[in-house]
Image (cartoon, rainbow, N blue to C red):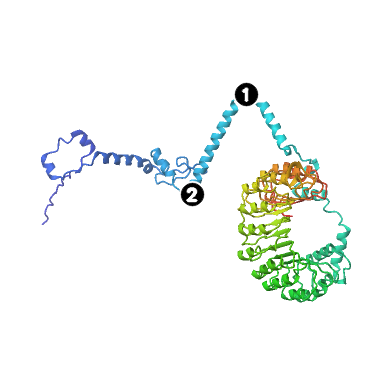
Amino acid sequence: FFRKPSIITMAPRRSRRKTNEDADKNDGTENSNDEEEEQPQERVLPSAVRQRNRAVAEREASRLARPERRKVGKLEHATKGKSAVSSTPFGFHAPLHNKQDEDEVQEWCGPFSVARQMISKREEARRQREEEQDTEKEISHPLDAIMEQVEIERKRKAHPSLQWKGKISAEQQTGNIYSKRQRRVQAQGKSKVPTLFQICVDFLVAHFEHVEALGAVDSTIRREVCNGLVAQSKLTGAAFDVIAELGIEALELIDCAEVTQEQLAEALPKLLPAGLRFILLHHSGRCFGPMAVEAICAVPESQLFAISIGGAYLLRDSDASSLLNATAKSLSSIEFKACPNLGPEFCKALNTTFSSAGNGTLLELSLEDLPLSKEDLMSLSDTDAVRNLKSLSLRQVEKVDDEVVLKLLDKVGTQLEGIDLSLCHHITDASLSAIRSCNVGGALRSLQLSGLKHLTEVGLETLFTPVIPGLPSPPMLRSVDLSSCHYEVVTDNIMNLISRASSMKRNSEGDVSQNLSFMGGLVYVNVGGSSCTDTSMESLAATASSSLKELNIGFTPKVTDKGLGYLVSKAGTQLNKIIIWGCAQITDEFLDGHARIADPGLQVVGAWIKKGNTVSSR
């Protein structure tokens, strides 16, 4: 019933590819002709391909054998071989390609790679420089010490500020920054009893609601009282009625927020016939408008000499034109600040009423932050209305450029004493040439060029260099403001030229001599944000020690304790204010060790600034 299972024997299948051992032993001689016919023909690769595959296998063997091991460190090198970061799939253990391939990879234009390459080159250059210096030090000479001493003496003679040292007592060196500041304030007498004048002003301000009239006091006392009222928010309509009493010569208010236009329009017809000559309304707002202008124009024999209006947003262009036409006979000083409605009618009235054909003489003109077009500004020079100007200010007027300045200064006479072109960002060196050309009589004493980024060092050097054929002598300034210009424009060379030009003697024709004048030189100097160093302080000490009153070196990082201390030691007691905001390099050596530390007449502003991780302000 059951059948015996048959046994099937499986013959082993021959491999189509012989092993390396069989190939080495038999060398292909034992294969029969039948076997060659049964299996397919073997594909033979070229020798170059076999060598490349073998190289790839050997190169990747290390990666397949063990994982990539990353190093922990800082990113210090720009070269791939030295970097602590691997961005390749083969890791650090992969063999490098040839030198040419590696250099080609490093030259890609990514910003981070470029920065790393720059750092690498900088560090390499530093190492080479240090190696060169070490090599030079190894080569010594017996006269090196003598030559070094001679060089030090030469620097001391050229820069006397290097020898200045602050006189700080042992008590001043103890304590923290707060205790040092308290001692400094006490030494300068800031906590002393106020003066009798200040006590009287404070008493009047505190009880001003009971004051019926100020009486026959001058404008200085009235201005201090007004400032005190504004500081305590007491300048109301009732206070204005007390201040604006009959017989006053000047009506000056620094803030007219609580004064209405009706009050001012009611007071002006009474004040003008009684002798009011100066109207100075800062931050006037709604106070000065069409009603106030009509009140001024209604007075037939007005003796108004100067008018200064700021922030009058209700003043229209036609109102300003009517005001000039009505007061041109006596008006000689005009100032308008931030009045947004002034335009061509105002400029036309200014140009016609003060010309030689008109009946007015304009001595001072100040236009600040006004929306005047270039055509309006150019029309100011169509006539000779500016022929008698002594002060010209076009501060922060956007459309002012070199063409406007050249045309205006061409019409100005030889009596111009002050120019203010601050924050007119289109001004270049061409305007500097016009400024020097118009200074034929040598009357220019004040020059304000703050915030002009397009000025160059060459232009300023040309402005103040003496004895240039075809140009008058450089201006003999008493006040100069070159703050916030380009950092590299206002240098020690420029300050030296300005200081010497301002302090040299001049003959009757205005020519400059080489001798210093006994009248001194600069009085107000502002070089904030410049690259001036202690050399500029030495120039001021040599030429303006008897005249300098105020110095502003805010955010000037290259002026040190020695330069500033040397200037204070050489300057006279007329120096009353030094502004050093942003000068973190000024230390206690100057603040506690300068020659006038106990003199309350010298005020150092900005000494209480950031130090360490604390920020304080004064």
What residue does disc 2 label?
111
Of 30 and 327, nearer the camera is 327
Locate the N terminus and report the quarter of the image it occupies: bottom left
Q: Could you tell me which residue is drawn at 74 percent across and 58 percent down?
A: 390
Q: Is residue 378 left or right of residue 200?
A: left
Q: Is residue 26 left or right of residue 85?
A: left
| 182 shown above or below 212 | above
Where's residue 7, x and y in %? 14, 49
**In terms of secondary structure, where does tag 1 sit?**
loop
Q: Categorize mark 1 by other alpha carbons within 10 Å: few (<14), some (14-19), many (20+).
A: few
Of 225 and 339, nearer the camera is 339
Say which amino acid is labelled 1.
His
Q: Categorize mark 2 by other alpha carbons within 10 Å: few (<14), some (14-19), many (20+).
A: few
| 139 shown above or below 561 | above
Where's residue 388, x and y in %? 73, 60
Of 31 and 580, nearer the camera is 580
What residue does disc 1 label?
141
